[in-house]
Image (cartoon, grey):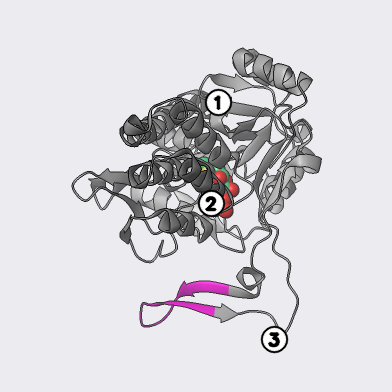
Amino acid sequence: MKVNGKHFRSLWWNAEAEVLEIIDQRALPYEFVTQPVRTVAEFAAAIAEMRVRGAPLIGATAAYGMARAMADDPGDVNMDRTWDILHATRPTAINLRWALDRCREALRPLPESRRAEAALTLAHAIADEDVEINRRIGEHGVTLIREIAARKPEGEPVRLLTHCNAGWIATVDWGTATSPMYQAHDANIPLHVWVDETRPRNQGALTSWELGSHGVPHAYITDNAGGHLMQHGLVDMVITGTDRTTRTGDVCNKIGTYLKALAAHDNGVPFYVALPSPTIDWTVADGVADIPIEDRDAREVSHVQGTTADGGLGHVRVTPEGTDALNPAFDVTPGRLVTGLITERGICDATGEGLARLFPEHARNAETQLESGKPRGS
Ligand code: MRU
């Protein structure tokens, strides 16, 4: 998508310098800072510190990290060590494990002399596939927005609500939850988006920055406002992203998503989840029991980040000194509260049957692995 009129992906390969370039998302929405990532340690830090964030982008970044490692030392020991280092960065988004497994499975059978080049080619392919997956999610999602628009008086906007940032900077491009929004806006369907603040890290500010850059009308709301807006008929549909969705349709996403789904259910508001297939964990059936939830630093809760009067970045404490805080970063919305999953292959029910209909090859494979007793989760 465009930043100040120039097209960007959220990461790109600098072939001359042989480094990955990323946007440091810690500085957004205040400053647009790009930076090179040069070593496996730097790749791990970029993911763990959330310079790159969002499930699909974490996966693509890890693939480039494996490419870096193979250029340094293409041996099996280094491949396994890199898998471990990168996998340990963040526990919840399954795209990380998906990308690392895909790299290892493709590279292991190759002679060491061919691994560096093959790993870079694969990282490029994973990044390009992500863009195409998200574009298609948008194509399917926009049909839902169009249907709502058709039921409204001419010119009245379709009012969407989203949580966290499932936008283009959380993917390689387009975003997942935002892709239908961008495509609807580009098709001149009147639209207005309620953007949840998403405490503690305020990813809603990133979504506002994205939507604003693309000219999509929106308003930033506190995390507690959504239920009230739904009760007053001000939300036509919720669309969120996901960090891991089970083979039965339970959706793990940014903390607070579950409460939005409950409010949507109570008010008869359709609740959709934009789901790229690499975000499906075919090994897990019960999301609440078996998805590991990242526990982040309590300081993210006790302090807020913002821009200071001199234009710099600052943190201020909002709690009394010494107050304990808890910071679970994700929660799980049971599939029964999800109206539908918008995937690159179409829209389905948030159930095992729904997902198996769209992805029969994965569902079959999962059955076989379960029968052979492979462990669940992590
Ligand atoms: O902690 P984050 O910012 O990485 O969490 C991101 C989310 O929860 C997104 O909603 C999810 O990854 C989907 S991104 C297309």
- Residue numbers of the magenta segment: 304-315
Q: Position of residue 277 (x, y in %)?
A: 56, 28
Provide the secondary structure element on which disc 1 rests.
strand
Q: Which residue is mark 2?
A: 85
Between discs 2 and 1, the one toward the N terminus:
2
Q: Residue at 48%, 50% (x, y): give it.
A: 218
Between discs 3 and 1, the one toward the N terminus:
3
Provide the secondary structure element on which disc 2 rests.
helix
Q: Which residue is mark 1?
A: 343
Instruction: Name the image quarter holding the N terminus.
Output: top left
Q: Nearer the viewer, residue 36 or 206?
A: 36
Residue 148 appearing in the image: no
Provide the secondary structure element on which disc 3 rests.
loop
Residue 114 sits in which quadrant? top left
Q: Residue at 38%, 36% (x, y): give it.
A: 123
Q: Is residue 312 magenta?
A: yes
Q: Which residue is mark 3?
A: 321
Q: Is residue 122 magenta?
A: no
Q: Position of residue 23 (x, y in %)?
A: 36, 55
Q: CA distance from mark 3 to mark 1?
A: 45 Å
Residue 46 appearing in the image: yes
Q: Is residue 219 left or right of residue 373?
A: left
Q: CA distance from mark 2 to mark 1?
A: 30 Å
Between discs 3 and 2, the one toward the N terminus:
2
* Residue type indicated by callout 2: Ile
* Residue type indicated by callout 3: Glu
Q: CA distance from mark 3 to mark 2?
A: 35 Å
